[in-house]
Amino acid sequence: MVIPLYKWLLLCTNLLPSASEPTHASPTPAVVHPLYVSVTEVNHNATDKNLEIGCKIFTDDFEKTLTALYKKNVDLINPKDKAETDKQIAEYVRKRFVVKLDGKEVSLEFVGFERDNDVIWSYFQAPAPLVPKKVEITNSILYELYDKQLNLMHVTVGGVRKSTRLNYPDKEARLEF
């Protein structure tokens, strides 16, 4: 079946967010992307007995959120004060991404961040001496910016990888291993 060009264009236009759709902040036309998503990788490293976490967020969305939160321009590509930027990222993610292993909240230690094309990866670790049977996650990353935010999480424990997603306004996920 061949779809006529005008129908294809209409379909594509309907998939993109319109200017009339409500969001917490309107993106500038130069950086609009139709998908508002973060991806977080959580890995239980049994050898090192810790939890390794990598959180991927679009740079433009992350900068907008941190700028609004801290009331000053945040540049994640060329930070003027790397220590201050580290602090802002660590504080932001820790408040919005909480992990419990077998019912006990873990304390996330910020390892650092790096730019990868149009995304920022922030890295955390936490002691996790025992292999967890249950992983509970509270994730509200970028919820203050977009009401169409989607947060994907991939959790690996004992070599078994499970994935889940949270659509705004849902914040809590639970995985059992």
Image: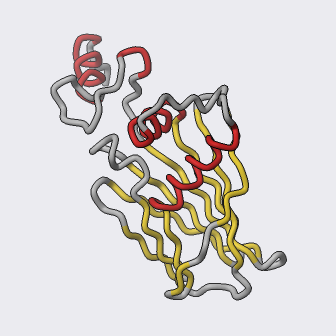
Quadrant position of residue 146: top left
Residue 142, given in percent of the width and then of the height, sits at: 40, 46
Residue at 53% across, 86% down: 104
Residue at 59% across, 77% down: 106
Residue 1, given in percent of the width and then of the height, sits at: 31, 25
Residue at 43% across, 67% down: 138
Residue at 54% across, 55% down: 91
Residue 132, given in percent of the width and then of the height, sits at: 62, 85
Quadrant position of residue 110: bottom right
Q: How many marks?
A: 0
**Taking 9 as reference, is 131 left or right?**
right
Quadrant position of residue 124: bottom right
Q: Nearer the viewer, residue 70 or 48?
A: 70
Q: Nearer the viewer, residue 11 or 25?
A: 25
Colour basis:
secondary structure
Q: Residue furthest top?
A: 5
Q: Is residue 131 above or below residue 162?
A: below
Q: Residue furthest right?
A: 47
Q: Is residue 169 above or below residue 74?
A: below
Q: Is residue 160 above or below residue 84?
A: below
Can you say which quadrant of the picture contains the C terminus? bottom right
